[in-house]
Image (cartoon, helix red, strand yellow):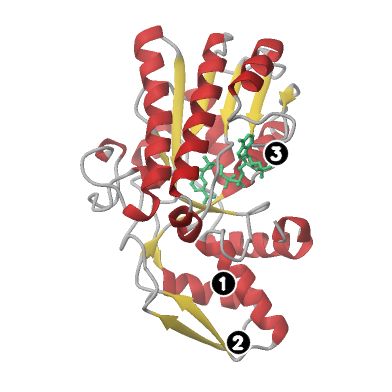
Amino acid sequence: MMEKNAKIYVAGHRGMVGSAIVRELQRQGYTNIITRTHKELNLTRQDQVEAFFAAEKPEYVFLAAAKVGGIVANQNALADFMYDNMVLEMNAIHAAWQNGCKKLEFLGSSCIYPRMAPQPMKESCLLTSELEKTNEAYALAKISGLKYCEFLNRQYGTDYISVMPTNLYGPNDNYHPTHSHVLPALIRRFHEAKVSGAESVTCWGDGSPLREFLYVDDLANLCVFLMNNYSGNETVNAGTGKELSIRELTELVAKVVGYTGEIRWDSSKPNGTPRKLLDVSKATALGWTYKTELEDGIRLAYEDFLHNPMRAER
Ligand SMILES: NC(=O)c1ccc[n+]([C@@H]2O[C@H](COP(=O)([O-])OP(=O)(O)OC[C@H]3O[C@@H](n4cnc5c(N)ncnc54)[C@H](OP(=O)(O)O)[C@@H]3O)[C@@H](O)[C@H]2O)c1
């Protein structure tokens, strides 16, 4: 259990996940949270990372910093996604261990699982067959991070864990027109279509892929819960265990945003993996479950989009 005054470093605290973890820690009464912006501490720079950990010696680390993006960003910058993420992870995890960090939690993503993994995907399907090509570079970097935690545990007896969230959304999401994930991208597109009075909105693919979405504050609650209640080499899936089609999601976002025009589908654009649903029985068995239903979460995310223009312009 983390003491309420334990020194806790949240890496990536201005991101969607990191900011939610800081909010959750504060809500639970943790008082000694340390943070650095990307500008103050570039985690891909080993010299900076070593100096920071040697000076601060955090007892606990939530590693929520990463170079993150949707399908287009991933495909256009394969090398950058692999290099930045792998180097950042190795630097931070290694320096944490070298400086006596008691427990570290590494944030990955469900894209680490094979493209054709049996659904819903269990933690044990990791590395059983080929990855989805569109985000292979990112997935390989994330697999390396979680494996490095496992190998430190096995070689040096550390207590480093990892969590693999499904698609996330909520406050501080990235609404960039080409570099965002599907749900924030839809919020932005439908909002702009509503404002401009557009007659139709064209979406990518045919709307058939099945996806799962978790509100980021629920993930943050799980992250703190796991830090206090879970140890083990195998990762823990974070999701709701519920899925819907991209077409259903699109209609839900249009409803929340108040867009009443036509929705069209451009099937010349890629769909991505046909179905992605996490098996969340491990988190459930540990005593955790999500709280925020999708429509309520989209409402909260849209409120944030409307009142957070800086983030929307990133
Ligand atoms: N978003 C999702 O749907 C989703 C789903 C599953 C898993 N995750 C995981 O959750 C984690 C965080 O994702 P997110 O959505 O919160 O991303 P995000 O909003 O883009 O935040 C990432 C944060 O990391 C920082 N960062 C990136 N490179 C850095 C570097 N070299 N040095 C220091 N800081 C750096 C960024 O700072 P700058 O903005 O200043 O660069 C940003 O604050 C990732 O590991 C991701 O795989 C996210």
Q: Please tell me in which quadrant of the rendered image residue 190 appears.
A: bottom right
Percent x, y of residue 132: 31, 52
Looking at the picture, tell me which residue is in the foreground, 99 or 90. 90
Is 30 left, or right, of 277 in this rendering? right
Residue identifier under label 1: 253
Q: Residue 99 vs residue 77: left or right? A: right
* Disc 2 + disc 3, Cβ < 8 Å: no
Q: Quadrant of ligand 1?
A: top right
Q: Which of pointers 2 and 1 lies earlier in the amino acid sequence?
A: 1
What kind of element bears circle 1? helix
Q: Residues within 10 Å of mark 1 (few under 14, many from 20)?
A: many
The residue that mark 2 highlights is 260
Q: CA distance from mark 2 to mark 1?
A: 11 Å
Answer few, some or many: residues within 10 Å of disc 2's Cα (few below 14, many 20 plus, some between 14 and 19): some
The residue that label 3 is drawn on is 23
Of mark 1 and mark 3, the one earlier in the sequence is 3
**Precedes in sequence: disc 2 or disc 3:** 3
Q: Position of residue 167 (x, y in %)?
A: 48, 53
Element carrying mark 3: helix
